[in-house]
Image: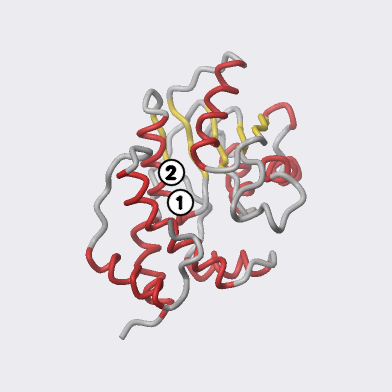
Amino acid sequence: MRSTIDNLQILWDFLVKEDSLVQSDIIIGFGSNDTMVAHRAASLYKLNYAPLILFTGGLGKGTADSWSEKEADLFAKIAIDDGVPLEKIIIENRSTNTGENIRFSKELLYKRGITVNLATIVHQPNMGRRIYAALRKQWADINVQIAPSNCTLKEYIQNLKTTGVDENEIFSNIVGDFQRIDVFAKQGHQIEQSAPEEAWQAFYSLCEDGYNKYIV
């Protein structure tokens, strides 16, 4: 019988998507309770992968009850502390979910006259496959490359725990992200992707263990 961590690792291995990177038009950092996203976006900017960073996120399901500062605002401060010039950062801080992240970011870039052919997308590692699927459906006229905040599952858990996020929240979030790949594709919000049977078995086991807070 697999342990909880073994089952989480199976979901993690399916959910994480990381592309080989080339220079792009913009880095888009998606908000969450994972501040490593901001550090990763800043690092990519300093490596000249794009001339601009857009941080998107107000307060969502992982931060609404625990943060007083909007995700994009905090991420921008972190990036500035990491050496990114203020004038190279665009902030979208109204969105509360992934669909709004995408829609409001598109609208903001259009209003500013910024043309994007290729975007470098930074999100939590467990959102890699899901954000790719959502972008292909909801922002299909641009190309994207996924560059998650680089870490292992163990490092990811430890990073979030140091910021006050408990294990139940972390584990439940990963389980919810896995299910959303199937549910949101059926609802037309994402392109379809097939998960291996082993991943579904791990998902059901984790739900039975109580990590079902974000099941839809």
Closest to the observer, 18 or 135 = 135
Residue 63's spot in the image, x, y percent?
65, 54
Q: Which mark is residue 127?
A: 1
Q: Quadrant of residue 16?
A: bottom left
Q: Which residue is mark 2?
A: 131
Label 1's element? helix
Seen at 26% across and 57% down, the residue is: 195
The residues bearing labels 2 and 1 have C-alpha atoms spaced at a distance of 6 Å
Amino acid type of the residue tagged 2 in the rendering: Ile
Q: Quadrant of residue 91?
A: top right
Closest to the observer, 84 or 141 = 141
Left or right of 31: which side holds 216?
left
Seen at 27% across and 44% down, the residue is: 192
Amino acid type of the residue tagged 1 in the rendering: Met
Quadrant of the image for the N terminus? bottom left
Q: Quadrant of residue 5?
A: bottom left
Vertical placement of 92 versus 123: above or below?
above
Label 2's element? helix
Vertical placement of 76 versus 24: above or below?
below
Seen at 73% across and 54% down, the residue is: 67
Left or right of 204: which side holds 78?
right
Quadrant of the image for the C terminus? bottom left
